[in-house]
Image (cartoon, rainbow, N blue to C red):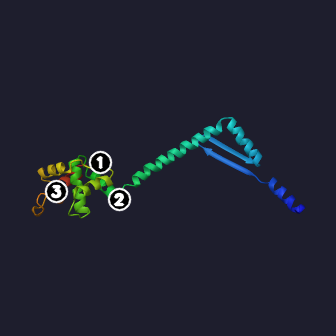
Amino acid sequence: MNAGILGYLRHGMNTKTTKISIHTGEFDFEAEGGQFEVEERISQYKQEGFWGAMLERIQETVELSKESLSNTSKLDSIPSRGADFRSLLDNYSLDGKPEQVLGALHFLREIEKLDDCPPRIINSLFEDAKIEPPGNLSLYINRLKERKFIQIPSKYGDKNRYAELTEEGRQHLEEKSTSL
């Protein structure tokens, strides 16, 4: 090899600088210099016990970030339909299951414009909103019929899947929304 190139390589190698800078909460680590100097500084930091504490702090931060991301993802994962239904329940202050079923029927019929609302559709709406679905849907629908909040058009016989809100049912929802 050419002596000039060797000299250049030696000179270039000698001027290389390594820099490490880590800031984690109350711990700051900075080392700058040649590779040997930086490694020596890291070794000293390890011996003093700061390196392990700093790594623990970094790990805690990573775990908290993952947890926060997971919680955000759960909120983001509520489909728009579920979020809209949940918003309706909150805005109308529908807390009990019978009133939530009334809200679901209102949502499915008036907002989504469905004529046929079988139990699986109603339950899926609750699931989309991340709310426990009503266990005995027929019981709640019968209670709503007794209170004259819903009716089933005579052409459908007694099929609950065709239940629709009555004027009293709509008025009840309206009163719930204005009583807040």
Q: Amino acid at mark 1?
A: Glu
Q: Residues within 10 Å of mark 1 (few under 14, many from 20)?
A: few
Q: Can residue 131 be seen in this snapshot?
A: yes
- Percent across and percent down for residue 171 are 17, 55
Answer with mark 3 or mark 2, whichever residue precedes in sequence: 2
| Residue at 24% in and 60% down | 108
Question: In the image shown, does 177 or 170 lie closer to the viewer?
Answer: 170
Seen in the picture, residue 154 relative to 35 is either above or below; the reply is below
Q: Residues within 10 Å of mark 3 (few under 14, many from 20)?
A: many
Q: Amino acid at mark 2?
A: Ser
CA gap between label 3 and label 1 equals: 20 Å
Q: Residues within 10 Å of mark 2 (few under 14, many from 20)?
A: few
Label ID, residue 160: 3
Answer with mark 1 or mark 2, whichever residue precedes in sequence: 2
Left-right relation of 90 to 6: left
| Residue at 27% in and 50% down | 133
- Percent across and percent down for residue 6 are 86, 59
- Percent across and percent down for residue 170 are 18, 57
Q: Secondary structure at mark 2?
A: helix
Label ID, residue 132: 1
The image quadrant that residue 4 belongs to is: bottom right
| Residue at 41% in and 51% down | 74
Q: Secondary structure at mark 1?
A: loop
> What residue sits right under mark 2 in the picture?
80
Left-right relation of 13 to 69: right
* Front disc: 3 or 2: 3
- Percent across and percent down for residue 172 are 18, 53
CA gap between label 1 and label 2 equals: 17 Å
